[in-house]
Amino acid sequence: MVQNAENVVDHFQLFRGPEYREMFKNKRDNFENGTPEEEVNRVAEWTKTVEYQEKNFAREALTINPAKACQPLGAVFAAVGFEGTLPFVHGSQGCVAYYRSHFSRHFKEPTSAVSSSMTEDAAVFGGLTNMVDGLSNAYNMYKPKMIAVSTTCMAEVIGDDLNAFIKTSREKGSIPQDYDVTFAHTPAFVGSHITGYDNTMKGVVEYFWGGKAGLAPKLERTPNNSINFFGGFDGYTVGNLREVKRIFDLIGAEYTIIGDNSDVWDTPADGEYRMYDGGTKLEDVANAVNAKATISMQQYCTEKTLDYIKTWGQETVALNHPIGVAGTDKFLMEVSRLTGKPIPDALKKERGRLVDAIADSHNHIHGKKFAIYGDPDLCLGVAAFLLELGAEPTTILSTNGGKSWEKKVRELLASSPYGKDCEVYAGKDLWHMRSLLFTRPVDFLIGNTYGKYLERDTGTPLIRLGFPIFDRHHLHRYPVWGYQGALNVLVWILDKVFSEMDAHSNVAGKTDISFDIIR
Amino acid sequence: MSLGLAESEDLKAKNKALVEEVLKVYPDKTAKRRAKHLGVYQNGKPDCGVKSNIKSIPGVMTIRGCAYAGSKGVVWGPIKDMIHISHGPVGCGQYSWGSRRNYYVGTTGIDSFGTMQFTSDFQENDIVFGGDKKLSKLMDEVQELFPLNKGLSVQSECPIGLIGDDIEAVSKKKSKEYGGKPIVPVRCEGFRGVSQSLGHHIANDAVRDWVFDKAEGKPARFEATEYDIAILADYNIGGDAWASRILLEEMGLRVVAQWSGDGTIAELEATPRAKLNVLHCYRSMNYVARHMEEKYGVPWVEYNFFGPTKILESLRKIAAQFDDKIKENAEKVIAKYQPLMDAVVAKYRPRLEGKKVMLYVGGLRPRHVIGAYEDLGMEVVGTGYEFAHNDDYQRTTHYIKDGTLVYDDVTAYELEKFVEAIKPDLVGSGIKEKYVFQKMGIPFRQMHSWDYSGPYHGYDGFAIFARDMDMAINSPIWKLNKAPF
């Protein structure tokens, strides 16, 4: 018996004990009808081949281990960034349970959102009653300042009309006539979570600027010197938005972060549960119409939103999740250009410190090959930083990246000699990546938690960077934007590089010639 | 630890007043509906006095999931040598990917597929023109890339039932093409029913129709013995089913199948030949247990492997279905582990004695874990289920005390208010609830995933359960919530 009260062992040690190992063998040999070990090994080896990769890439219907989620997840991400706002997802209720769990597993924080709990009868008759009752209940129970409505695929397939339903809800008195309810159709069978972010942000901006869905006159724009800022769907939103605010403050810019969810996903444990915290004030969203320009940190998260904002005469600037020296330079220079304020020396110093850190460490990263996967903008930002470090991006893959993204990545790669051997894969999944890691091996893989399966199967060390990250804690509290953010990313990469060096040079008398205490 | 009459009446009055108070937040219609789901247990009553298995109310923040979660996430997903296709848009499969910790032994991606996400990733065209052709092609691709799979299941997401796809026809045709390979279409669209529960039922029915019926006449893979049993409704979360199986085997029984944690299609097919089905999570698999009893004459017994008191009762109850040899063995097993249990209780009970617990879990644990807490001297003062039916609440009466607060399909608001008022020493619920209560300074354990620990079943599991409850409640962090300034 392995278990004992003095040193209680759990699944890590328990199932490695002889009793359990014997039990597993007995189960397999007698009852599972399992495939013989040699055959399992043969097939496992076959999956590593070019032949398998060709079959794998010939797939047209099957998606395996995709690196993307569905639109309403992005809708909830966007909605919780507004002051006192409750996300309301119209459709089946299980979806909302999934979004809440998904975010809580990443941020280790509560995530509040409600569903209109549509079932069979709503599938037949439409979900109007669910909307009317749901808005009334949510409004009374959770006393939100605003409700942001989005849809699950069920409501989209049956064709529920959010604008009409919300109007009817007002008429029926389920919410006050002038109560703010924004809405966006977010079908799960179009795009991904970044599309849902975009649709929701556009919905919010359009609601406040365009006359609150008929409740108020359309706003008149009186341009001022302020700038608007969108972070996009971002697993590092807590650290990043705080860093961006610090940067704006250092520059002395007037700004509005639209959709600031950095506080609601980082509330203190001081005895009080805050269902809402922080967030962009609703009057600030309205006033944002007057801004001189809007900056988006993630182009592919805000395409429709920026197009809409352009129609108001604002200049828009779309970046691609800038990480590193040049990316941050560009961000700061755009802010400086748009606000007419110089970049202060304090930031110049931070820049110098980052360059100093890279100079100190680049030799451990130079020439190392990397595979990267994630959301389209993240891939661009990470790749640009790797090129600065002298690393060689070798494989870049984005399940929710499209043709224009692919072109943009190729342009980036062409700008550096370190990018010349890189292949780019739009719309592919992590089972494609698995083949690629066998046929075009790299030194390191950059991706989210699911990358650990690739690390296990292919032996490629994983550097966790992306969303979701379930199996490491608190990384989301650190920025990856700004010079400070790039420093964090540099350290995460280096930590893995050094750990790998040690892990491969720590056998006494065999490999420990290189087991250095100074690196 | 039972309360005196006056105390018990006082508790009931307090809890009733609390329910009244909490209901005030709702609009009238909603208050009326929610009132039926909130109750205070009265000793001697046949159930807990709450309505259940009724539609959740829109907008209230129910904690429930859907039928897909019940079928793919719970029942089918853990069958390790089959490929379960999340059929529809990408999200459902993504959010349920690997998150339930149904442990298994196997080479993932080669002969086992439990922690993978296979989806048809529906696009607009699939909604407009239907997804049957895509499904058909997808199955061919699965066959080519994963030749060692032993079967497929089609886990329907919401759109499938709305656009009129015929997944049964595709499944039949493809099964024939692949020489009779099991291909199981499951109509578990998320809008069906009121919770995960209908998904369990639909998944059970799919086993009946697409596994048992098709397997009839196939030769048995092993010779039956008098001691063959199957474990039903243990999902092997953190290894629970293994910590249970080892005890059943130690008492001389032969476990021929595990449903469904670490399970295989071969085990499902073999189960109607078992002499006894032992059922852990009644809620999610009573349907298939009843079916096997009616059609194949396999009796079933419910058991509870949480905590030494219930394990002892259960081992004897199972042994009672067999001959004296097994009964004697059961006593030997109990005796073998008694010193371990004594040591665990001696170590942890003094640290946990008298602590109050509130639970809100799925369809089994709100009652099944109560004995384990009591073994540690703890008291469950409130409990409720996400997706129980009335027969679960009847069974709950055997576990709870007079005056216990009972909440069915609780809303986030209600649970928060109940906990605020009752101030338990521990809340046991899910990931969506965890951080709410920790912010409030209340120790918490996830009672779906064991907070990534486990197993909690069996004697080995109880030691871990005790350790974990102790570390939750007695962590020094709870003294630091309030700043000294």
Image: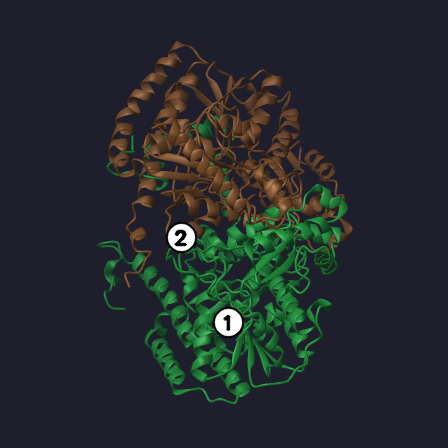
Chain colours: A green, B brown
Q: Secondary structure at mark 1?
A: helix
User: Residue type at mark 2?
Assistant: Met
* Circle on res. A329: none
Front residue of A392 and B26: B26
Q: Is residue A57 left or right of residue A514?
A: right
Q: Do badges 2 and 1 share one subunit?
A: no
Residue B3 drawn at (x, y percent): 36, 29
Q: Residues within 10 Å of mark 1 (few under 14, many from 20)?
A: many
Residue A21 drawn at (x, y percent): 37, 33
* Circle on res. B440: 2
Front residue of A508 and A183: A183
Any part of residue B457 in sight: yes
- Where residue A226 sits, quadrant-wise, is bottom right
Up-down: is B458 above or below B98?
Answer: above
Q: Which residue is mark 1?
A: A381
- Where residue A470 sits, quadrant-wise, is bottom left
Q: Is residue A258 left or right of residue A272?
A: right
Q: Residue at x 40, y 85 (%)?
A: A348
Q: Quadrant of the N terminus of chain A?
A: top left
Residue B455 drawn at (x, y percent): 39, 36
Residue A32 drawn at (x, y percent): 50, 30
Q: Contact, CB < 8 Å: mark 2 with mark 1?
A: no
Q: How many marks?
A: 2
Up-down: is A31 above or below B93?
Answer: above
Up-down: is A406 above or below B345?
Answer: below
Front residue of A201 and A479: A201
- For the residues marked 2 and 1, what is the alpha-carbon distance in whole angstroms? 38 Å
User: Residue type at mark 1?
Assistant: Gly
